[in-house]
Image: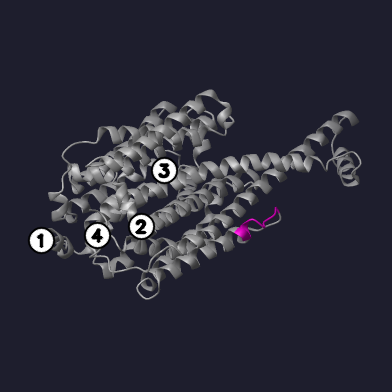
Amino acid sequence: MSSSAQNSHWKPRHNPWLIAVSVLLATFMEVLDTSIANVALPHIAGSLSASVSEATWVLTSYLVANAIILSATGWLSSYFGRKNYLGFSVILFVVASAFCGMAHSLGQIVVARVLQGIGGGGLQPLSQAILLESFSPEERGPAMAAYGMGIVVAPILGPTLGGWLTDSYSWRWIFYINIPIGIAGLIMQDLFVEDPPYIKAARAPKIDYLGFGLMAVGIGLLQIILDKGQEVDWFSAHWLRWCAAISAISIILFIWHELRTRHPIVNLRVLKNRNFAVATFLVAILGAILYGSTATLPIMLQGLMGYTALASGWVMTPRGIGSLLSMIIVGRLVKKVDGRLLIAIGFSVIALTSWALSRLNFNIAPSNIQIPLILNGFANGFIFVPLTVVGYATLRQDAIFQATGIYNLMRNTGASIGISVLIAMQDRSAQAHQVYLSGHLTSLSPNLRNFMHLVERSLPGSHQSAFHVAQGVVYQLLIQQATFLSFMDVFRWMAEASFICMFAIALFKKAAPPAHVSIVD
């Protein structure tokens, strides 16, 4: 039997759904950690005697390590064996989670988060590849729906769970919770997961040291630039200009090297497939919108509207419910309806709900946020499942795993870029709104004079001291209103980005049977 025929007819010995549960436990655990720490960041900073700005390295260090390892997962699993690498990743992630919970200084938790990112980087592409290879092409829709529940729902539930653990117990439990989940997943993987014959036969002969080094430098510096750029006014800082130059050169050399080397650490040639290339672009935009909104909404709710960490998490919970419902429905629709139509519906609903969120004001109830969010979450399933099916439809089976590393890398890179860019733009937009609103605060404004008089009369003390306090009150209201308007701008930008994605959907070719198309020579 030829290698191609062997790849097409291979089936796992165990029930595919037992394999799915085994790998989804690890996936859910890892994706949950991308958002669960967001609401606990002030508590972590206070406990470790660090500022909130310094504590952002708790998030950044994880993302940098995760992204670097994520892109190299295909090569690492080929070199060490997929099952071996999966088990090592879970063990490292669980041990690093325990170290995060036991940390007593900022340096200790940053080092532990780097190790956690290294362990977690391979879990998503490994899980997705195992699911795609364990299920037949006809059954991949429901399998991707199950995988999507972990990928889409986990970062949405993360703030709720993180807020509850932080308020009820301690921020350390947002890391300790990974230990029992990881152990259960590790036991099931040892029992049910196996390497296909073509994974066992295909072993990379040597490590692509140059490619890995260029990738690590390029992506690592890019993440640092995006994370710290706003704090130092971007290219006004001398060190940031050097980092940007080195990052750009490293990424360019990395692409050139990977396209020329015989055994690349990241097989960029898989992007020759048009459906997969378009899907990779769209999943990056989806990652930016999904993770960007998950990061900005708790900041707005807690910073401007006085919500606790737990309360803001509860407000965002309906989004997870919407995602769960859509994953169940779309898993069946994807077999009967053109995936391109489902993707277009999903981005249309995200655009409409993001626009609805951009029309909010201070006089709102939680339901004014929850209703758009549940529809927004429902739309995520209409994008994620068919986008994966259509994007992978024309890939050869033994090229699927090479593609998953790039696919997940671009989603995570899109997420990190989206978070950094949206927060930076929100900050600059707040400054612009502050300047604009300040132009209307003049001594000739009757509304301002009346408000100042009301505040002065309500305060004890001399007229002069009451006047200064009233000025402070007006200034704080100005800052609050400008900041709120900037968050409305963020949601409007998300709506515009979703609308632009509609044009990219037209580039998809109608999905062909996945088994007989070769894209990698």
Question: Is there CB contact under 8 Å for labels 1 and 2?
Answer: no
> Can see residue 23?
no
Amino acid at pointer 1: Ser
Q: CA distance from mark 2 to mark 3?
A: 35 Å
Question: Is there CB contact under 8 Å for labels 2 and 4?
Answer: no
Query: Magenta stretch?
Result: 355-362
Q: How did the renderer colour the structure?
A: one colour
Q: Earlier in the sequence, mark 4 or mark 3?
A: 3
Q: Nearer the viewer, residue 480 or 221?
A: 221
| Secondary element at image label 3 | helix
| Secondary element at image label 4 | loop
Name above or below for residue 12 compared with residue 480: below
- Among all residues in the image, which is located at the extreme top? 238
Q: Percent x, y for residue 212?
A: 30, 35
> Can see residue 233?
yes
Q: Nearer the viewer, mark 1 or mark 4?
A: 4
Question: Is there CB contact under 8 Å for labels 2 and 3?
Answer: no
Q: Nearer the viewer, residue 298 or 341?
A: 341
Give me the residue at 56% from left, 45% from top.
422
Q: CA distance from mark 1 to mark 4?
A: 15 Å
Viewed as shown, does residue 477 lie left or right of 330?
A: right
Q: Earlier in the sequence, mark 1 or mark 4?
A: 1
Q: Inspect the magenta stretch and tell me whether residue 238 lies in it.
A: no
Q: CA distance from mark 2 to mark 4?
A: 13 Å
Q: Which residue is mark 1?
A: 2
Q: Which residue is mark 3?
A: 174
Viewed as shown, does residue 436 lie left or right of 347?
A: right
Give me the residue at 55% from left, 25% from top.
237
| Secondary element at image label 2 | helix
Q: Which residue is mark 2?
A: 276
Q: Earlier in the sequence, mark 2 or mark 4?
A: 2
